Image: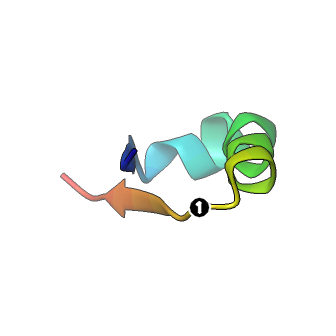
Amino acid sequence: MINIRPVSDLRNKFPEVEETVITTNSPVFLTKN
């Protein structure tokens, strides 16, 4: 499944994004508005 998140999640929810990458072993695509 493709995981698309806003780039602001890197600042606001970094641990959650990191955990997603580690557990799913797949990339997270970041979007910029």
From the viewer's perspective, tell me whether residue 7 is left or right of residue 21. Answer: left
Give percent across and percent down for residue 6: 37, 45
**Label 1: which residue?**
26
Q: Where is residue 29, by image quadrant?
A: bottom left
Residue 16, position as x, y percentages in the image: 73, 34
Horizontal placement of 1 versus 9: left or right? left
Q: Position of residue 26 (x, y in %)?
A: 59, 61
Give the image quarter of residue 12: top right
Farthest-out residue, left: 33
Colour scheme:
rainbow
Q: Secondary structure at mark 1?
A: loop
Q: What residue is at 61 percent from the left and 51 percent from the top? A: 10
Q: Residues within 10 Å of mark 1 (few under 14, many from 20)?
A: few
The residue lying at 69 percent from left, 43 percent from top is 20
1 above or below 25? above
In percent of width and height, residue 28 lies at: 50, 58
3 sits left or right of 15 in the view: left
Q: Is 28 on the left or on the right of 16, as rendered?
A: left
Which amino acid is tagged 1?
Answer: Ser
Quadrant position of the N terminus in the picture: top left
Q: In this orientation, which residue lies closer to the viewer: 11 or 1? A: 1
Q: Quadrant of residue 9?
A: top right
Residue 29 in the image: above or below residue 16: below
Q: Is residue 33 above or below residue 12?
A: below
- For the residue pair 10 and 27, the one nearer the viewer reads as 27
Q: Residue at x 64, y 47 (%)?
A: 11
Q: How many marks?
A: 1
